[in-house]
Image (cartoon, rainbow, N blue to C red):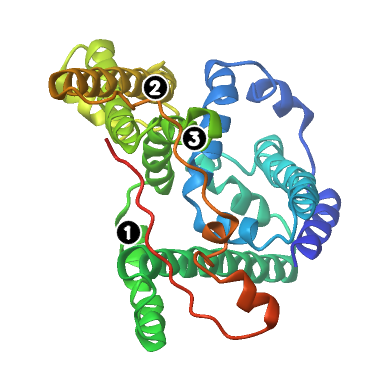
Amino acid sequence: MVVGLIILGVITVGVETHVDRSLVESSGLLSANLLGWQLIYILPVAILTNDFFISGFWMRTFASKTDKDLVIGTSIATVAVTFILTLVGVTGLLAAWTGAWPGNPPQEGSIAFFLLLEQLPGWVVGVILVMVVSLSTAAFDSFQSAMVSTGSNDLFRNKLSLWWIRAAVVLVIFPVVVVALKSPDILQVYLISDLVSASSIPVLVIGLSDKCYWWRGFEVVVGGLGGLLTVFIFGTIYFGNAHEGAYLLLLENGLYSNDWSAFGAFVAAPIGGLLWAAGAFTFRVGFQWVQAKRKGERFDAFDRPPPQSPGFYAGREGWPEEEERDGHEATISVEPQKGRFF
């Protein structure tokens, strides 16, 4: 469907639209500007960190049979998505250069794609709209299922009945629709979540490395909250008052404020988070050292935890190997392994 949409759109846009060359230079879209340079940093940071919270991606990652299959799949998807986003993004340029945007009266730039569609034949518009709605529905279905699956696993440990899960899938539609209708700008909703992920993910991924076995959940929590606090501090200093600094956490001005506020927020979030996490790590280690000295115990903050058996990662902890080889049914005893928060 995506390939069909791209082929149909490219052919009809190329045949039916007419670029006014005088608008190419006057639009200024090919000239460098402050926002363009800022987005070179903002978009990779926002998208990369936010993808860590998208359960649909993790579901597909864990479904890969081998690491090689995962690399091949992500490589193919990267090339395909790059071409698709490039072609879809160019429609904004074409809308401006054909005079479809900003229009009379002037329209928002976010609907430039649909303004360009108005210049195409009616049957083409109908087919493209059906495809767009179908693709949006498919994406929403993945996010919806991922949200419910995550809630079932993390909150209820997969003990809910299948019918309750199906009911939750239906019920979650209503708040999503309300948020979509009430939100003044859907881009703002994404930017808020991007800012949260930019502050918390850098300190989280440190703990994913085997070399950083001494990293604890305490540093992750303090770092994530500290990153947001750093954004508030930056906004207060940048705007000169705490009220505007608090609004920067919500990115009220979006990305198109033509200043350094949004860029500064996405710089302050990860750097501030890492600094707060480093401070929390120093405090925790110092506190544990003082406690060990006071109680006369061994200081073990930097001791490497004992390695887990392969069965722990496969959910087969405690499986009797002899009975497994003999083909007999064995009782699996899995004790919950809790990490150390502090």
Which residue lies under the disc numbered 1? 179
- Provide residue 110's location: percent of width, then percent of height: 52, 44
User: Which badge, 3 or 2, comes first in the chain's sequence?
Assistant: 3
Amino acid carrying label 3: it is Val
Of badges 1 and 3, the one in the foreground is 3
User: Which badge, 1 or 2, comes first in the chain's sequence?
Assistant: 1
Q: How busy is the neighbourhood of tag 3: few (under 14 within 10 Å), some, or many (20 plus)?
A: few
Residue 223 lies, with reference to residue 58, above or below; the image says above
Considering every residue shown, the one lying at the far left of the view is 294
- Provide residue 324's location: percent of width, then percent of height: 64, 76
Amino acid carrying label 2: it is Leu
Q: Residue at x 48, y 75 (%)?
A: 332
Question: Tag 1, which secondary structure?
Answer: helix
The mark total stands at 3
Instruction: Depth check: give the residue in front, 280 or 79.
Output: 280
The quadrant of the rendering that contains the N terminus is: bottom right
Q: Residue at x 64, y 55 (%)?
A: 61
* Image marks 1 and 2: residues in contact by CB distance under 8 Å: no
**Residue 184 horizontal side relative to residue 328, left or right:** left
Quarter of the rendering containing residue 279: top left
Instruction: Depth check: give the residue in front, 195 or 179.
Output: 195
Which residue lies under the disc numbered 3? 205
Which residue lies under the disc numbered 2? 274
The quadrant of the rendering that contains the C terminus is: top left
**Residue 57 horizontal side relative to residue 186, left or right:** right
Quarter of the rendering containing residue 196: top left
Question: Tag 2, which secondary structure?
Answer: helix
Label 1, label 2: how far apart the Cα atoms are:
32 Å
Label 3, label 2: how far apart the Cα atoms are:
11 Å
Residue 232 lies, with reference to residue 159, above or below; the image says above
Question: Tag 3, which secondary structure?
Answer: helix
Residue 120 lies, with reference to residue 144, above or below; the image says above
